[in-house]
Image (tube, grey):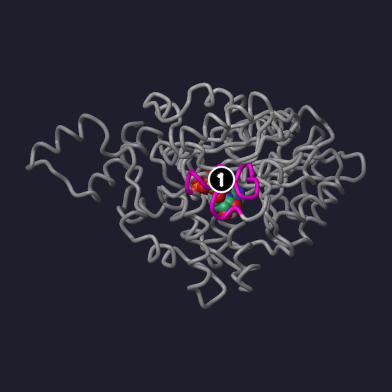
Amino acid sequence: MVKEPIVIIDDDKSICKTLKLHFERNGYDVTTTQMAYEGLSKLESFVSAIVILDVRLPDANGVELLKEIRQKGDNYYSIIVTAFPDMESTIKAVQNGVGEYIHKPIDIEEIDSAVEKAGEFFQSKYNQKTSFIPVPVVKDIGRQFIGKSHVMKEVFKTVGLVSMSKATAHISGESGTGKELVARAIHQSSANKDEPFISVNCSAIVDTLLESELFGHEKGSFTGAITQKEGKFSLARNGTIFLDEIGEMDINLQAKLLRVLQEKEFERVGGKEKLKCNCRIISATNRNLEDSVKAGKFREDLYYRLKVISIHIPPLREHTRDIPDLTMYFIAKANQELNREIKYISIDAIDTLTEYPWNGNVRQLENTIIHAVIMTRGDRLTANHFKSILGPEETETYSGLMDNTESESFQNDENTLKSLNEVEKDQIRLTLQHTKWHKGKACQILGITRPRLDRKIKKYGIKPIQYYMSKA
Ligand SMILES: Nc1ncnc2c1ncn2[C@@H]1O[C@H](COP(=O)(O)OP(=O)(O)OP(=O)(O)O)[C@@H](O)[C@H]1O
Ligand SMILES: [Mg+2]
C-alpha cells in the first residue's frame, strides 16, 4: 500500500527528530520543519500528506494554519499536537478541519493510532472516489535516481563518499538494477563532473578490438588502422571511464588493464609513447567476479585493484518499498518522452507491481510501464494493463505459505492436499489470529499490502470470531 508522506511542523527540534526516526522506521517518508509557512510551502510538493502540526509556532498559530492547509484541498490530513490544550482552540481546530487532536507529551501509541486513522482516511477516500492516485505532473523530469528504502539510501551514501575522491570503484548487481546509473551518479557528484563520462561495454566488443578501443592505436598497427586513433582512456581525460561487464574481458587484456591501474600509464596499440591515465575507473559486473577468480578466468590481483571500493546494488525484490515511487517516476517520464497524458494509476495496479518478482529488476519495471503507457488509450492505468503484460499467474505471490516443513509433509499426503485458495485462506486467518487482527503486522508477515489483505478478507469472508472467542 502507498503510505502517505508525513510532514511534521513543530518548533521543538527534538520532537521532529524523534518522530521522524519513528515514522521512517515504519516505512513513511518524513519531512520536518520548524516554521509554519515553510511547512505550508513544503506541502505543495506532495499530492497528499499527513500533517503533524504544533499549535504554538514562531511564525503562526497551528490552528489558524489548518485553515490554509484545508484551502489547499482535501488531500491533507492534519493532526494537531499541543502542550497547551484548551477548549477554544480544540473547537476551532475541529472547525478548521483537524483530523486528530493530541496532547503533549506525545504518547507514541496515540500518535501511531492517529497516523493509522489518517491512512484509513486516505484509503477510504481512494476507494470511495475512484481508487486511483494521481501521477505527479513534472515539467522537466531528467534522469533521476529514485529510492527511499534503507538499502538504496546506503547505496546513495556510498555514492556520496566515493564521489569525494578519485578512488577506483566496482559496482556489482543483477542485470537492470541500475549499475550504470550509479556510475553516472558518482561521476555527476564528483569535482570532475564537467569532464567526460565514457562507458565501454567490454562484452559487446571483440577482444582484439577492445584493446584498441580502450587504449587507441597507431596508424598502420594492424590491418584497418588507417589513421592514429585515441582510445577511451585518453578521451575520458580527467573524467570517468565506466568498464561495464568487466567479467567478460579477455585474460590478456586484463593484464594490460592491471598495468594501467598500477602505473597509471598505457600505450596505444602498436605504439611506444607512454600516455597518462588521469581518469577514474569504475567497473561493473552482473556476475560473481569472485567465482570467475576461483575458476581462473579473472585475475585476482586485478579484482582487488578494481574493487578498492565496492558497491552492491540489491535486486528490486529486496527493495519493493521503492516500487510505488519508481512507478510514478517512470509514468511521468513516459508521459514526457512519449507525449502521453496518463494522469492516474489505480491502487490495485501499484499492488500488482509491488508484488511482482521483477527478475529483470528496475529495467524490467521501466519497460513494463512504457509498454503499459503505450497500450493505454485513456488517462489511467489499472492492474489489468499490467496483468496482461506480465501474465496473470506471476502477479500472485504466495511467499511464505509453502516453505515450512508442515506444508511439505501434507504435500506428501494426497488426501490432505488443499487448493491454493484454501491454503491462502487458512494462512491469512492464522496470521490475523496471531496478530490479534492487527492488519499492519499481518501484512508484514504475509508480505502483502493492506488493500490486498482487505480484499482477501472480504473474498474469503474471514471474520475475527475466533479472536473474540479466545478472548472471552
Ligand atoms: N533507482 C533508480 N531510479 C531511477 N531509475 C533507475 C533506477 N535504477 C535503475 N533505473 C533505470 O533502469 C534502467 C536500467 O538501469 P542500468 O542500465 O543502470 O542497469 P544495469 O545494472 O547497468 O543493467 P545491466 O546489468 O543490464 O547493464 C535504466 O533506464 C535506469 O535509468
Ligand atoms: Mg549496464
Residue farthest along the bottom direction in this orientation:
377
Compared across the picture, whether 279 is left or right of 174 comes to right
Determine whether 233 is above or below 75 in the image: above
Residue 421: image location, x then y, percent: 25, 51
Residue 437: image location, x then y, percent: 41, 39
Q: Can the viewer see residue 244 in this picture?
A: yes
Q: Can the viewer see residue 28 in this picture?
A: no
Q: Secondary structure at mark 1?
A: loop
287 in the magenta segment:
no
Residue with the mark numbered 1: 178
Q: Quadrant of residue 344?
A: bottom right
Compared across the picture, whether 413 is left or right of 346 comes to left
The crowding category of the residue bearing disc 1, from other C-alpha atoms within 10 Å (few below 14, some 14 to 19, many at least 20), is many
Q: Which residues are magenta?
A: 206-225
Q: Residue at x 67, y 51 (%)?
A: 144
- The type of residue carrying mark 1 is Gly
Determine whether 193 is above or below 394 in the image: above
Q: Quadrant of residue 345?
A: bottom right
* Nearer the observer, 467 or 273: 273
Compared across the picture, whether 428 is left or right of 17 comes to left
Q: Residue at x 76, y 38 (%)?
A: 190
214 in the magenta segment:
yes
* Nearer the observer, 290 or 469: 290
Q: Residue at x 72, y 35 (%)?
A: 275
Q: On the rendered image, what quadrant is the C terminus found in? A: top left
Residue 320: image location, x then y, percent: 50, 44
